[in-house]
């Protein structure tokens, strides 16, 4: 394991001004998103969408790395170049999702565990040969009356540790993603407790399994109210609770925190990231604080495209504008658009 190389890749991914795009929707999820805009979901239409995103002129100014799905890393653009090469030619690091999704956790009604460890060493070697330099594994924790259970947190934390150790062995930076879901009507306090319990167990496993913390990126949820909470916390409270939880539970050796958007709207995800970064600058957080958003970066651009070649340029402009605003939030310099116009 080349620890210096891993640490250098991790640092580049979370360096100031840029963040990560999660374009690793599974074929099932990406197909549902295409259907929602009236586009027939095929390997070709999924490729057309990713090509639009990766070739947006100036994208690399805001995006340090892109997480791809297995299908995408094997696809090529209209000009014959591999999509992974289009990214690296533009100065964007290619990444790959290596988990195989979630299944019901036996004995834990309503809870999920992430699969994908079998054969992972071989798949990681192949992805490294294809140009990937970082990876992602997403564990999902849900909040309910009796959940998350210790059993679910333990099972997922153990799998994250095994994945991260294997990724580093293969020379790939692991993005460690324990996502506490926003689904439900829970309070920000419940989210804080579930996130704290989860992060604690994850870092115990990373340590027990010999993972070098300087060569990982943590991709957590923000500490935030549930979508259906009757009393959703403000951005200032989200920032305060998120930073408090991370400072308590994330070692300073981790180079960067890259938040998921988790179903927040694009404006909400931008405002919250901005508030967190302003507070992190005031308080002197020990790690970089950036984004690894999927929906919050691309949802509006996807609707603008609508599957029509005639809309590619306009969709790319919409994408770049959202990337620019999110990058401003990553620096803590975002100012919301005045009513009726873009900022
Ligand atoms: P969202 O930002 O849409 O939550 O996607 C990030 C991600 O990679 C979830 O696994």
Image: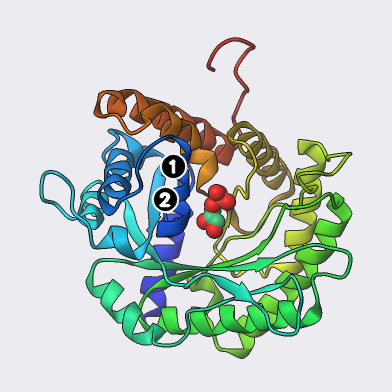
Give the labeled residue for mark 2. 31
Q: Nearer the viewer, residue 222 or 48?
A: 48
Q: How is the image coloured?
A: rainbow
Q: CA distance from mark 1 to mark 2?
A: 6 Å
Q: Residue at x 32, y 48 (%)?
A: 46
Q: Residue 37: which quarter of the image?
A: top left
Please report contact status of discs 1 and 2: CB closer than 8 Å, yes or no: yes
Mark 1 residue CB less than 8 A from any atom of ligand 1:
no
Q: Is residue 127 visible?
A: yes
The image shows residue 292 at horizontal and vertical percentages of 52, 51
Circle number at residue 287: none
Is residue 210 found left or right of 80 in the rendered image? right
Give the labeled residue for mark 1. 35
Determine the residue located farthest toward the left in the rendered image: 80
Q: Is residue 307 above or below residue 159?
A: above
Q: Residue at x 52, y 30 (%)?
A: 325
Q: Residue at x 74, y 75 (%)?
A: 200
The image shows residue 326 at horizontal and vertical percentages of 53, 36
Determine the residue located farthest toward the top in the rendered image: 340
Q: Is residue 222 above or below residue 132?
A: above
The image shows residue 191 at horizontal and vertical percentages of 81, 57
Q: Is disc 1 surrounded by few (<14), some (14 to 19) or many (20+) residues within 10 Å?
A: few
């Amino acid at each position: 394991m080349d620890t210096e190389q891993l640490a250098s890749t991790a640092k580049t991914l979370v360096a100031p001004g840029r963040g990560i795009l999660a374009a690793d929707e599974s074929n099932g999820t990406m197909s549902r998103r295409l259907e929602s805009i009236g586009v027939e979901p095929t390997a070709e239409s999924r490729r057309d969408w990713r090509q639009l995103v990766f070739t947006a002129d100036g994208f690399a100014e805001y995006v340090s790395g892109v997480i791809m799905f297995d299908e995408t890393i094997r696809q090529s653009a209209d000009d014959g170049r591999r999509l992974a090469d289009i990214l690296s030619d533009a100065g964007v690091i290619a990444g790959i999702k290596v988990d195989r999704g979630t299944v019901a956790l036996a004995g834990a009604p309503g809870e999920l565990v992430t699969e994908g460890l079998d054969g992972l060493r071989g798949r990681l070697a192949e992805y490294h040969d294809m140009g990937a330099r970082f990876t992602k594994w997403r564990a999902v924790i849900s909040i309910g009356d009796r959940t998350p259970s210790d059993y679910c947190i333990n099972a997922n934390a153990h799998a994250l540790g095994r994945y991260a150790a294997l990724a580093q062995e293969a020379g790939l930076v692991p993005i460690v993603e324990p996502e506490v879901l926003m689904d439900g009507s829970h309070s920000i306090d419940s989210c804080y407790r579930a996130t704290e319990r989860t992060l604690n167990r994850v870092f115990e496993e990373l340590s027990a399994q010999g993972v070098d913390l300087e060569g990982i990126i943590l991709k957590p949820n923000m500490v935030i109210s549930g979508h259906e909470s009757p009393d959703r916390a403000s951005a200032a409270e989200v920032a305060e609770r998120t930073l408090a939880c991370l400072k308590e539970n994330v070692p300073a050796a981790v180079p960067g925190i890259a938040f998921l958007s988790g179903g927040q709207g694009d404006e909400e995800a931008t405002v919250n990231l901005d508030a967190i970064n302003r507070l992190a600058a005031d308080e002197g957080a020990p790690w970089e604080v950036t984004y690894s958003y999927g929906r919050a970066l691309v949802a509006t651009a996807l609707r603008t495209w609508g599957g029509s070649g005639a809309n590619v340029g306009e969709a790319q402009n919409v994408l770049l504008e959202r990337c620019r605003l999110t990058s401003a939030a990553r620096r803590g310099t975002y100012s919301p658009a005045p009513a009726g116009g873009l900022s």
